[in-house]
Image (cartoon, rainbow, N blue to C red):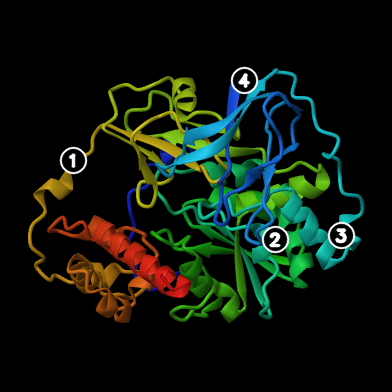
Amino acid sequence: MSYTFKGGLHITDHKELTNSLKTVRLPDYPEHIFPLQQHIGAVLKPIVKVGDTVQVGQKLADSDAFLSVPVHSSVSGKVSAIRHRLHPSGDKIDAVFVENDMQYTVHESVRPIEDYMSKSKDELLSVIREKGLVGMGGAGFPTFVKLNPKQKIDYIILNGAECEPYITADHRRMLESPSQILSGLRIAMKVLGLSKGYIGIEENKPDCAAALEKALGGKGDIEIRMLKTKYPQGAEKQLIHAITKRSVPSGKLPADVGAVVMNVDTAYDLWNAFENGMPVTRRIITVSGDCVKNPVNFEAPIGIPFEFLFEQAGGFTEAPKKVIAGGPMMGTAQYNLKPPTIKTTSSLLAFHKIDDIYSSETPCIRCGKCVEHCPMHLMPLNINKLSIAKNYELAEKYHILDCIECGLCSYICPSKRNLLHNIRVGKQAITAIKRAKKSGS
């Protein structure tokens, strides 16, 4: 039996380029750049200064804000600068620059947490925060906040769907570190007070399911459920409905229906934080696309410029017309290859064979395909029209804020309407209006 949700669409995924290739450790790079914003929440403040010597796992920046976690160095060396640097979001963000001494001396704070499964919930959450854990699936929500909801939780679900085309970082993590993922899930279960956990894996990854089942060894505290292969099966609300049949109401969070969703790579980082005492300093990054010479999955330290990863993948066979950080459906297009990898950099994709489809946008023919496939059961054609007209009050009544920005409406539109862009602009405008009203300005 495969589990799924209503809506969505099967998309050619091109995962065969990298899903069978073992993860490759990225070579040394002379200077690492650590932006002071790598997750949802507050911008951090540096706690080191230029000239300081730092080590692997040492804290570089932190914040007193609740929604924040620190950033740690992935190398040892000297702080060479603290200044603006281009961020994958397109903004310029303050960053800590560290000259890599190539010694990778580990900081004294990096040590295993003894007997951690007997520790209290608050003690576990404190470690999770201090080790800088965030959601590694893309959103980057601080893990210690996610694992400490006010609501009663009945389900914890590990997201192994990885439904975006091209990306196979989670695929390789599940194949190469199944027992570590299970250990991380059990830590999360301990924090939430649950005796059972679930892992959702799309049917196009039977090897991952087999590896995790083997690592489970017949233990019944974790159940693997196979999901129908379609996009966006890995979206949080869709995954919850597929596995629990519970629907997250408009304006509510997963915790409001008793569920917590966590990425499989986040579970690995949980294990690493407690078993080895290591903060988030490395991650698997897929480098792929139709003009990348040697598509590959790298185990990469945080803070390396995008251009170096493409160089190590053999460079480009043709000049790329578009480079994307993240997946082709929800990722962020890059106009420069200078930004560094951050905690949420799951993939870097380069494409030459891309048509400028939106230059030939034609009037909506009201075919209803965007409505049929919308995983949130919205009416994208109407929300798009209202957003263009800046009728934000009515757009909100049409639940524009419930849009998860999966991009299916734009992908499926025969008129090549740029629905996602217009809806995203509308959402941003509504959020800005609400913020201004709240501040009284």
Q: Position of residue 94 (x, y in %)?
A: 54, 38
First reached walking from the N terminus: tag 1 or tag 3:
3
The residue shown at (72%, 70%) is: 196
- Depth check: give the residue in front, 396 or 249: 396
Distance Cα–Cα, label 2 vs label 3: 16 Å
Is residue 146 something that shows in the picture? yes
Distance Cα–Cα, label 1 vs label 3: 53 Å
Circle 2 is placed at which residue position?
Answer: 144
Q: Identify the mark at residue 113; answer none if there is no mark.
A: none
Distance Cα–Cα, label 1 vs label 4: 36 Å
Q: Position of residue 334 (x, y in %)?
A: 36, 37
Q: Answer few, some or many: residues within 10 Å of disc 3's Cα (few below 14, many 20 plus, some between 14 and 19).
A: some
Q: What type is the residue that disc 4 sits on?
A: Asp
Q: Closer to the observer: label 1 or label 4?
A: 4
Q: Is residue 78 above or below residue 158?
A: above
Q: Position of residue 78 (x, y in %)?
A: 70, 23
Circle 1 is placed at which residue position?
Answer: 355
The residue shown at (49%, 33%) is: 85
Q: Closer to the observer: label 2 or label 1?
A: 2
Per the image, label 1 sits on a secondary structure element best described as loop
Distance Cα–Cα, label 2 vs label 1: 42 Å
Q: What type is the residue that disc 3 sits on?
A: Met
Circle 3 is placed at which residue position?
Answer: 117
Q: Position of residue 165 (x, y in %)?
A: 39, 47
Distance Cα–Cα, label 3 vs label 4: 35 Å
Per the image, label 3 sits on a secondary structure element best described as helix
Q: Closer to the observer: label 2 or label 3?
A: 2
* Rendered-image quadrant of the C terminus: bottom left
Circle 4 is placed at which residue position?
Answer: 28
Q: Is residue 217 above or below residue 302?
A: below
The residue shown at (33%, 49%) is: 12
Q: What type is the residue that disc 1 sits on?
A: Asp
